[in-house]
């Protein structure tokens, strides 16, 4: 139960601390005009004391009311700078072995070559602090202090939970020193920063009349009461979040799962992962330094900030737009013509859209988008260049209605918009307005200039699951006793007819069945029909990236998952298995025995970072 207190005692306790500092208050905190007591003639100073107690900052809870972040008493042990520390004896005092002592001290130092005697503070548990107090006479050089600070009850969800600016100052200083220009790209405060005002509550103001000795003599204006911060109930399932983080571990990439019926984000993984408390803990400076220096950029919030080519998962958008524009029908057949574009695997002829999706045939979708771009409206029959410009502009207009090429408005501090090319972009890039489809064909397979974020990838799959509409993805389902922010209850519709989305689902289901690109990731053995689409994104600078989007159950979607694993190869072998394991975990609560070995192998690779 949250602590309650008597208003009178609260006022007196605060004044005992704050009024003593009144003489050095800023101009904002005091009124220079003195007040004179008409009876005694004594002159009193007018003070205005701001009351904003971080102790009563709201909590952060998951969707099942598990407390994830709260303000709690923290114990800090300051080690002596000189003489040299007896680490063996310190370990015995705290109940740590020698390895733990050296690791904890190393984690607290901001760089490896820190000089001897560099100031170090270690976070202790209540039991460890009790042992220090008990033997304090034997350790006169140790200083134990207490302070209230945000405490994380879970190591998962660092990119979601974030930090308060006041507690992350040490991290900000390190980031500016190590990364300079990249500092603001790495800075992402999660829900703690985005909802800071609601978590903090409203300041209160006291207006005491104070004599020269600091004693109070009534008030000169009406006091206002401090309002406690509100709790945030997240959409995140912390157990699912922790599970998904173990599947990605030290690999580079992201996994976003959401409920398509509400837009609630069920898990939000940015990998490589790190512990949620790392950026604010006073004894994690060394860990932060390694995170900042890592070329894998673990502090980058990948699902929100990193926009990449989506690869073949974008064929879903191209197919929906082509159906809407009448460029193809569900029964359209195209030959797998390798002279147009290579197809990475052998498969039967794609005699319909369903089979085109099942086999993810590149030549098939090359010809789908060619029909879109080279379509000749009657009004432009004599001007093929003008027709291509008009068709690309219309394609982009339909695609943008998916929430692409713009920020979705998710409740996190920083979000990238992604990119869809315009006709003017190609006029400039190709240095001529007479470019042809052959110079932009990479759009047909989700490559080239197209860039999507992980949030947009997941939302795109949610739109297909909902047959054409979506709620903006969000991380907070209720604020205090209320609901989410009003904009998250507004339904958005695309410009594509629902029938054209329904036409995509049989092909997505076929992807997960025998002969489909992700048939090995089927959940049919546990009665779950998954609809999915794999993607393998060409990468000129290394191994290809693996992508997958999907939802389950296919006929009544309850979860959508988007996975992107950098430099992991095929989407079918690297991304799809992670996605279906998260689906199974969410829908069934456990993983079937036949996939346990598969699960263990994925987690082992994630731990090793490949």
Image (cartoon, grey):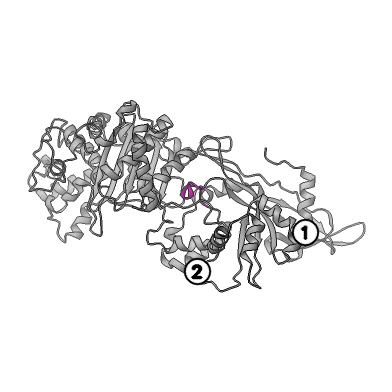
From the viewer's perspective, is 174 left or right of 126? left
Instruction: Determine whether the residue tagged by mark 1 lies in a helix, strand or loop.
Output: helix
The x and y percentages for residue 52 are: 67, 52
Q: Which residues are magenta?
A: 155-163
Between residues 108 and 313, which one lies in front from this camera angle? 108
User: Residue at the location (32% across, 32% down)?
Assistant: 465
Q: Is residue 156 magenta?
A: yes
Are dots 2 and 1 in contact, CB under 8 Å? no
Please, is residue 77 above or below residue 422 in the view?
below
Per the rendering, the mark at residue 19 is: 1
User: Residue at the location (23% across, 36% down)?
Assistant: 320
Q: Is residue 561 magenta?
A: no
Per the rendering, the mark at residue 112 is: 2
Please, is residue 115 above or below residue 484 in the view?
below
The CA span between labels 2 and 1 is: 44 Å
Please, is residue 85 above or below residue 195 in the view?
below
Between residues 239 and 316, which one lies in front from this camera angle? 239
Whether residue 322 can be seen here: yes
Q: Which one is closest to the eye, mark 2 or mark 1?
A: 2
From the viewer's perspective, is 225 left or right of 277? right
Marks 2 and 1, the one that precedes in the sequence = 1
The x and y percentages for residue 323 are: 19, 35
Circle 1 packing at 10 Å, graded few (<14), some (14-19), many (20+), is: many
In the rendered image, which quarter contains the N terminus? top right
Q: Quadrant of residue 300?
A: bottom left
């Amino acid at each position: 139960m949250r602590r309650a207190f008597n208003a009178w005692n609260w006022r007196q306790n605060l004044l005992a601390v704050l009024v003593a500092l009144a003489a050095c208050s800023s101009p904002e905190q005091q009124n220079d005009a003195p007040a004179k007591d008409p009876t005694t003639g004594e002159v009193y100073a007018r003070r205005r004391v701001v009351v904003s107690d971080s102790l009563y900052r709201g909590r952060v809870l998951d969707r099942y009311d598990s407390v994830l972040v709260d303000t709690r008493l923290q114990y800090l042990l300051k080690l002596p700078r000189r003489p040299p520390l007896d680490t063996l004896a310190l370990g015995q005092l705290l109940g740590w072995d020698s390895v733990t002592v050296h690791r904890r001290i190393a984690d607290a130092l901001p760089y490896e070559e820190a000089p001897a005697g560099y100031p170090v503070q270690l976070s202790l548990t209540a039991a460890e602090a009790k042992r220090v107090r008990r033997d304090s006479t034997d350790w006169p050089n140790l200083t134990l202090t207490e302070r209230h600070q945000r405490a994380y009850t879970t190591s998962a969800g660092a990119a979601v939970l974030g930090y308060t600016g006041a507690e992350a100052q040490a991290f900000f200083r390190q980031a500016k020193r190590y990364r300079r220009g990249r500092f603001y790209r790495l800075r992402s405060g999660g829900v703690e920063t985005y909802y800071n005002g609601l978590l903090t509550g409203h300041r209160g103001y006291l207006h005491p009349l104070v004599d020269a000795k600091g004693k109070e003599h009534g008030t000169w204006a009406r006091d206002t009461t401090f309002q406690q911060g509100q709790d945030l109930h997240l959409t995140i399932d912390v157990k699912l979040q922790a599970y998904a983080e173990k599947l990605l571990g030290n690999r580079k990439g992201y996994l976003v799962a959401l409920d398509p019926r509400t837009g609630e984000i069920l898990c939000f993984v940015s990998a490589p992962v790190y512990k949620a408390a790392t950026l604010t803990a006073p004894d994690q400076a060394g860990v932060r330094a390694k995170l900042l220096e890592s070329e894998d950029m673990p502090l980058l919030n990948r699902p929100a900030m990193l926009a990449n080519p989506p690869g073949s998962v974008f064929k879903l958008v191209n197919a929906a737009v082509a159906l809407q524009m009448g460029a193809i029908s569900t029964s359209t057949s195209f030959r797998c013509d390798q002279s147009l574009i290579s197809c990475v695997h052998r498969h039967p002829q794609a005699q319909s859209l369903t089979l085109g999706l099942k086999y993810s045939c590149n030549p098939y979708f090359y010809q789908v988008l060619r029909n879109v771009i080279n379509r000749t409206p009657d009004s432009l029959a004599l001007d093929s260049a003008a027709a291509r410009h008009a068709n690309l502009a219309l394609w982009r207009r339909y695609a943008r209605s998916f929430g692409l090429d713009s920020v979705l408005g998710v409740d996190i501090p920083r979000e990238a918009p992604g990119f869809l090319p315009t006709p003017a972009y190609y006029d400039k890039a190709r240095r001529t307005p007479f470019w042809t489809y052959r110079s932009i064909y990479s759009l047909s397979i989700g490559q080239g200039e197209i860039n999507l974020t992980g949030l947009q990838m997941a939302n795109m799959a949610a739109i297909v699951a909902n047959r054409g509409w979506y709620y903006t993805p969000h991380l907070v389902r209720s604020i205090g006793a209320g609901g989410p922010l009003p904009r998250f209850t507004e339904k958005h519709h695309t410009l594509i007819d629902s029938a054209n989305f329904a036409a995509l689902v049989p092909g997505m289901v076929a992807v997960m069945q025998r002969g489909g690109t992700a048939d090995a990731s089927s959940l049919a053995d546990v009665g779950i029909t998954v609809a999915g689409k794999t993607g393998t994104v060409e990468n000129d600078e290394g191994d290809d990236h693996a992508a997958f989007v999907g939802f389950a159950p296919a006929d009544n979607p309850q979860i959508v998952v988007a996975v992107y694993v950098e430099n992991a190869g095929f989407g079918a072998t690297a991304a799809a298995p992670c996605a279906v394991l998260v689906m199974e975990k969410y829908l069934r609560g456990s993983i079937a025995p036949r996939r346990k070995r598969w699960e263990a192998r994925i987690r082992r690779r994630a731990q090793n970072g490949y």
